[in-house]
Image: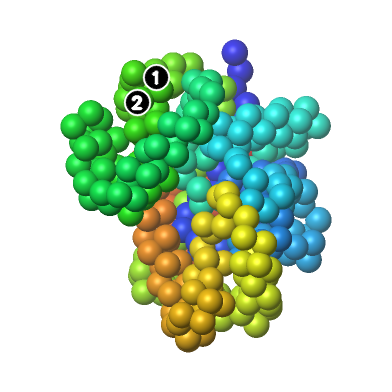
Amino acid sequence: MKKQKIICVVGPTASGKTGLGIALAKHFDGEVISADSMQIYQDMHIASAAPDESETEGVPHHLVEFLPYGSSYTVADYVKAARKKITDIASRDKLPIIVGGTGLYINSLVNNVEFIKQETDFELREHITREFDRIGGEEMLERLRDIDPDAASKLHANDKRRIIRAFEIYESTGHTKSFNDEISIQNESPYECCMIGITYSDREKLYERINTRVDVMLQNGLMPEAQLAFQKKIGGGAVQAIGHKEFFDYFKGEISLDEAVENLKRSTRRYAKRQLTWFNKDCRINWIYKDKTPNIEELAIAIAEREDNYA
């Protein structure tokens, strides 16, 4: 079966993925599908750095700001939606271009991961959550090592949600998360993917860009957006987004504004580091360094034409 060609543009936050994706879409007559776990939400336009109409330059963008704030959305939901968008875009003789920094979304889509259907047992989740709160992340992670050392090795003690999820899978299915992950990748990918990564060779330059970006977000109204989120008091993935939660203690009067801003900058830098750690494990990615490449758009186009013969 002939595989569907796609381009993936990946990299850390603030590296310039949006602009590069648009340039590729304009050159190859494509449309963009976002792979950003926060840009899916409404009411997070500034915090998620979702592109507006002036930035997209007429290139259609899909899976952006379509979900109500606070709604639950899993990687399985994303893969299902992205597959449909790819099919739709290709049916119109356009090239699907996946752009984003959520590595789990991209990896699951490109590798054709099939997710095992599992009903959520809210009582079980609540029980595991209470246990986590009682003994703490370090002890819970140590317990997870006893039953699923592979999953535990990929998690940090502060990653409460994923630790709880690993226990939830084990308790409800009798199998570890690692086992479920292994059997979920059984079918060959239907995509022929050219993967292009964009970042800076000098990490400090990326961090400087992140700091500047936060300052610009504040000028553009990040504070009122975060305050609205704080007032809603809604749970879900959006509330954990970097860009809003760092201000919640300020709104409570527990820290200063300067402290909140510095917390945001630090959280964003750490997130960028985690993204790079994830993507650096993927040998398929062709990296472009903004601080070393005079014209990143021309280089990205040349890579795509070389890798997948789009010319």
Query: Residue visible at 26% across and 49% down?
Result: 135
User: Label 1: which residue?
Assistant: 173
Give percent across and percent down for residue 138: 23, 50
Colour scheme used in the picture? rainbow
Amino acid type of disc 2?
Tyr
Q: Residue furthest top?
A: 1
Identify the residue shown where x is 65% and y is 46%.
71
Tell me if residue 278 comes above or below residue 14 in the rendering. Answer: above
Q: Which mark is residue 259?
A: none
Left or right: residue 107 versus residue 201 is right
Q: Is residue 133 left or right of residue 101?
A: left
Q: Are marks 1 and 2 in contact (CB under 8 Å)?
A: yes
Residue 38 image point, x, y percent: 59, 53
The quadrant of the rendering that contains the N terminus is: top right
- CA distance separating discs 1 and 2: 6 Å
**Which disc is residue 170 wearing?**
2
What residue sits 37% from the left and 48% below the top? 160
Q: Note whether 164 is above or below 204 in the view shown.
A: above
Instruction: Evaluate whether residue 159 shows in this view.
Output: yes
* Label 2 SS: helix
| Vertical placement of residue 142 versus 235, above or below | above
Q: Where does the image place residue 228, in percent across and percent down from the top left?
A: 68, 68
The image position of residue 126, as x and y in percent, is 44, 39
Q: Is residue 156 visible?
A: no
Q: Nearer the viewer, residue 297 or 44?
A: 44
Considering the image in quadrants, where does the C terminus appear?
Answer: top right
Please, what secondary structure does the residue beneath circle 1 have? helix
